[in-house]
Image (cartoon, rainbow, N blue to C red):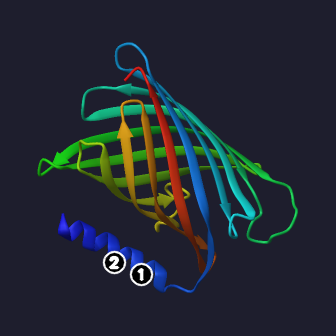
Amino acid sequence: MKKGVFSLLSVFYIVLAQQSFHFYGSWDGLFIHVRCKNRWRVNNAFHVRRVGGLSLPQQNLWRPSLQYQFNAHFAAFLGYSYIEHFPYRTKEVSPVTVENNIWEQWVWKHVLKKHFAIKHRFRLEHRWRGGKFSNRFRYRFIVKYPKKGVFYVKVYGEWFLARLLQDRDFNQQRYYLGVGWRRQRLEFAIGYLHRAVKRKERWEQNHLANMKMAIYFGE
């Protein structure tokens, strides 16, 4: 576990050392989960993402999905994302780029030393954006402590391959540290999210307040 955390931090600081430019803002999300009969769940997510001290829209996102829970450890998802990308880097008024993507996702959960909930999330996205098509792979490693309780601490790292089978290096990385509260059907979380995206020869660094509200039905 210690070696894994050290490796994540090493990658993080290597990215920070690169020549880069910075944006500050907030990514906020509303999540709605509806548990159906048997092992099925319908999920919905809405995201508003802004930078430039919240003055510049970065993305608006809608992401519905269907989930099947095989058991306590494994789940599969099929989803769709509608994303509006705004030209925040230029601060100019120009057409918004719309992305449509269909994605498959696999989640594996397990417990470490009785108190740490570990989640591995693998997602494959099929993206149509600006008249171009590409496949993107994402892997997220999540640690939650304690695994049960009203209050918790959560950390995660996520890595992206923007063009699957073409890119050899991760062109986007995200690191999160936050705290949360959940009781029955309602959950709130707040934290710091660092997002690094490779733009040609430079890295774009996003320093983001990350707020989440989730509502659960049928739990």
Front one among 51 and 87: 51
Residue 114 in the figure: left or right of residue 43:
left
Residue 103 in the figure: left or right of residue 8:
right
Examine the rendered structure and indicate whether residue 12 appears above or below residue 66: below
Question: Quick one: label 1, few (<14), some, or many (20+) residues within 10 Å?
Answer: few
Under mark 1, the amino acid is Ile
Number of numbered discs: 2
Q: In which quarter of the image is the N terminus?
A: bottom left
Determine contact: label 1, label 2, CB under 8 Å. yes
Q: Residue at x 48, y 52 (%)?
A: 137
Residue 28 in the figure: left or right of residue 59:
left
**Residue that numbered label 1 is attached to:** 14
Mark linked to residue 199? none
Under mark 2, the amino acid is Ser
Q: Where is residue 28 in the image (x, y as percent from the top left)?
A: 58, 51
Classify mark 2: helix, strand or loop: helix
Question: Quick one: label 2, few (<14), some, or many (20+) residues within 10 Å?
Answer: few
Examine the rendered structure and indicate whether residue 23 appears above or below residue 97: below
Q: Position of residue 78 (x, y in %)?
A: 49, 31
Q: Quadrant of the C terminus?
A: top left
Extreme residue in the left direction: 113
Q: Position of residue 29 (x, y in %)?
A: 56, 46
**Residue that numbered label 2 is attached to:** 10
Front one among 13 and 192: 192
Q: Would you identify the image quadrant in which residue 178 lies?
A: bottom left
Q: Would you identify the image quadrant in which residue 200 lies?
A: bottom right
Q: Spatial distance from mark 1 to mark 2, Cα to Cα?
A: 6 Å
Classify mark 1: helix, strand or loop: helix
Q: Residue at x 51, y 43 (%)?
A: 213
Q: Where is residue 194 in the image (x, y as percent from the top left)?
A: 49, 68
Front one among 41 and 97: 41
